[in-house]
Amino acid sequence: MAEFERDDSAPVVSPFVAGLRGRCPRCGQGKLFDGFLTVAPECPACHLDYTKVDAGDGPAVFIILIAGFLIVGLALFVELTYQPPYWLHALIFLPLGIGVPVGLLRPFKGVLIALQFHNRAREGRQHPSSEG
């Protein structure tokens, strides 16, 4: 990810609030997304360029770990406590297994992008060492 053009004269916007609301990390007003997960080309309010944004696989990894822990833990609890038939497990946990990750993906992606902006994230660089 290339560096965002961060303007220190702009009002400070919480990256968590902006990300969860899907708003611009600089002004907190404009939309961050064009579609469900498609990042807009720029902020319609402050014209921050979003073309350099790259959340990568970060949001998906966090969601897999969090949703997997919650859903598998709940499924084990239900199985050990109530021992329902397998069709009831499928009826409960298949929609949860789809709904929870899909519901969390956009807010997590928004927060990760806003945190990248807030922390002035940029691609890793190697500095030439003076040691021969």
Image (cartoon, rainbow, N blue to C red):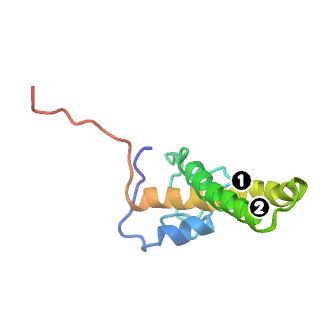
- Amino acid bearing label 1: Gly
In the image, which disc is placed on residue 79? 2
Residue nearest the observer in this picture, 54 or 78: 78
Vertical order, 127 against 97 (above or below): above
Residue 27 in sight in this render: no
Residue 69 locus on image (x, y percent) = 62, 58
State the residue at coordinates (81%, 54%).
94
State the residue at coordinates (42%, 52%).
4
State the residue at coordinates (90%, 54%).
87
Q: Which residue is mark 1?
A: 35
Please report contact status of discs 2 and 1: CB closer than 8 Å, yes or no: no
Residue 17 vs residue 35: left or right? left
Residue 7 vs residue 81: left or right? left
Residue nearest the observer in this picture, 36 or 58: 58
For residue 21, what is the image quadrant? Answer: bottom right
Query: Quick one: quadrant of the C terminus?
Result: top left
Residue 104 in sight in this render: yes
Callout 2 secondary element? helix
Residue nearest the observer in this picture, 127 or 93: 93
Tell me if mark 1 has few (under 14), some (14-19) or many (20+) residues whose alpha carbon lies within 10 angstroms of its own.
few
Residue nearest the observer in this picture, 99 or 108: 99
Residue 26 vs residue 20: left or right? left
- Amino acid bearing label 2: Glu
For residue 23, what is the image quadrant? Answer: bottom right
Vertical order, 124 against 8 (above or below): above
Query: Quick one: quadrant of the N terminus?
Result: top left
